[in-house]
Amino acid sequence: MSRGRSLAVAVGVALVLWGLAVASVPEFAGGVTLTTELLGAVAVVALAGGAVAVRSRLQSDRAERNLATPESADEFSTPGEEFDEELAALAPNGRMRGASERRAIRDRLDELALRVLIRQGISEQAAREQLAEGTWTDDPYAAAFFAEARASDVPLEERLRAAFSGEPSERRRARHAADALAAIASREREQ
């Protein structure tokens, strides 16, 4: 609060207290008689003070509405964004930057698949067998991600369409496997 405002508040509080004292004990007026001119002067001062307060409030509201924009907003990653970036890194010939990256995707999906299937109420060994046999899903691409022998279960028409799509088979299988696992997990949450 500025000095002028502090002084005005102090004077106002003192005058209000003095007015209350005079209202309760008229002798505190100290010989001041209430005339029309005095009441008019008090009214003018009160109106001027109110106008100054309203004007400063309007200006402060305008200043608050025109706040500076922050330099940068915080960005948070979306769940699964890192996995999507790893999948996108698969080269058109089906190879990623290296075997370690390819293995990281496989390990990540293996772990996820085991957790999802075990939550379905089967043992870890049975889950591993279902993944190896490709019987855990009806999606042939998803099944082929874990069981290479199931890749031939994809109809010829689908294999031809996939061959001309330009999407690497490793990426397509991983994407289908992730989608199938997400569908199983969402069905489980709905039950």
Image (tube, rainbow, N blue to C red):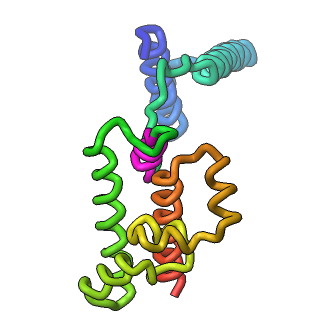
Q: Residue furthest toward the top? A: 4
Q: Main secondary structure of the magenta part?
A: helix
- Residue 114 placed where, x, y %? 31, 75
| Res. 53 visible in picture | no
* 189 lies above or below 160: below
Side of 114 relative to 91 (left or right)? left
- Residue 69 placed where, x, y %? 55, 20
Q: Residue at x 28, y 44 (%)?
A: 99
State the residue in front, 40 or 117. 117
Q: Which residues are magenta?
A: 80-90
* 97 lies above or below 108: above
State the residue in front, 169 or 177. 169
- Residue 190 placed where, x, y %? 54, 82
Q: Residue at x 64, y 16 (%)?
A: 59
* 108 lies above or below 66: below
- Looking at the rendering, in which quadrant would you find the N terminus? top left
Side of 32 relative to 177 (left or right)? right
Q: Residue at x 48, y 29 (%)?
A: 73
Q: Quadrant of residue 122?
A: bottom left
- Residue 13 placed where, x, y %? 46, 26
Q: Residue at x 53, y 70 (%)?
A: 152
Instruction: Give yes or no for residue 169 being in the magenta stretch.
Output: no
* 181 lies above or below 190: above
